[in-house]
Image (tube, grey):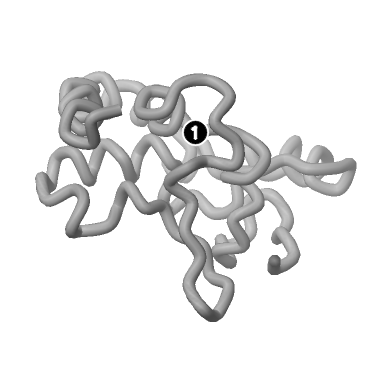
């Protein structure tokens, strides 16, 4: 498994976030305690991805958008694992929020608009 980047650095697709914690999508689809996330996939090069974003699994664009919001797609590494990450988190989170990369209010509004799609996704996946 690849080393985890510092919090806020670009995602390197190491997958450690999905091994150690559940995103909101995983909690809705699989329930609490599903670790590592059952949707975590690795390719032959060791790059991780969310199986719930597989275009063959989810074809609805709104459901895909809801999943992207729920997994934190595009905000960089959001896993806090250790002292270095804690220090960097305290420095970077306000800047990420100010840039709109981690605007909790915006993500919450968007997630609320798309929550029905997550429920539909759960129904489609029959979990």
Foreground pick, 15 / 122:
122
Residue 94 visible to an observer of this rendering: no
Q: Is residue 17 shown above or below 29?
A: below
Q: Is residue 57 shown above or below 43?
A: above
Q: Looking at the image, which residue sits at the far front?
A: 126
Is 89 on the left-hand or right-hand side of 11? Answer: right
Q: Looking at the image, which residue sits at the far left?
A: 60
- Residue at x 30%, y 52% (from the top left corner): 53
Q: Quadrant of the C terminus?
A: top left
| Res. 63 image quadrant | top left
The picture places residue 68, in percent across and down from the top left corner, at: 33, 45
The picture places residue 20, in percent across and down from the top left corner, at: 67, 39
| Res. 78 image quadrant | top right
The picture places residue 16, in percent across and down from the top left corner, at: 65, 51
Is 120 on the left-hand or right-hand side of 16? Answer: left
Residue 86 visible to an observer of this rendering: yes
Is 87 on the left-hand or right-hand side of 104? Answer: right
Q: Quadrant of the N terminus?
A: bottom right
The picture places residue 69, in percent across and down from the top left corner, at: 35, 39
What number of labels is visible?
1
- Residue at x 17%, y 21% (from the top left corner): 116
Question: Are there few (<14), some (14-19), or many (20+) residues within 10 Å of tag 1?
Answer: some
Foreground pick, 73 / 31:
31
- Residue at x 23%, y 30% (from the top left corner): 126
Asked which secondary structure carries label 1, the reply is: loop
Q: Is residue 9 shown above or below 96?
A: below
Foreground pick, 98 / 1:
1
| Residue with the mark numbered 1 | 23
Q: Looking at the image, which residue sits at the far bottom?
A: 45
């Amino acid at each position: 498994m690849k080393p985890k980047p510092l919090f806020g650095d670009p995602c390197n697709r190491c997958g450690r976030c999905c091994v150690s914690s559940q995103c909101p999508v995983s909690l809705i689809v699989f329930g609490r305690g599903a670790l590592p996330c059952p949707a975590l996939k690795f390719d032959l090069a060791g790059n991780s991805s969310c199986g719930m974003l597989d275009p063959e699994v989810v074809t609805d664009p709104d459901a895909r958008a809801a999943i992207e919001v729920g997994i934190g797609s595009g905000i960089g590494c959001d896993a806090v694992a250790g002292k270095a990450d804690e220090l960097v988190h305290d420095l970077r989170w306000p800047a990420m929020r100010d840039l709109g990369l981690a605007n909790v209010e915006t993500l919450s509004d968007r997630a609320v608009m798309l929550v029905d799609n997550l429920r539909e996704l759960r129904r489609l996946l029959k979990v």
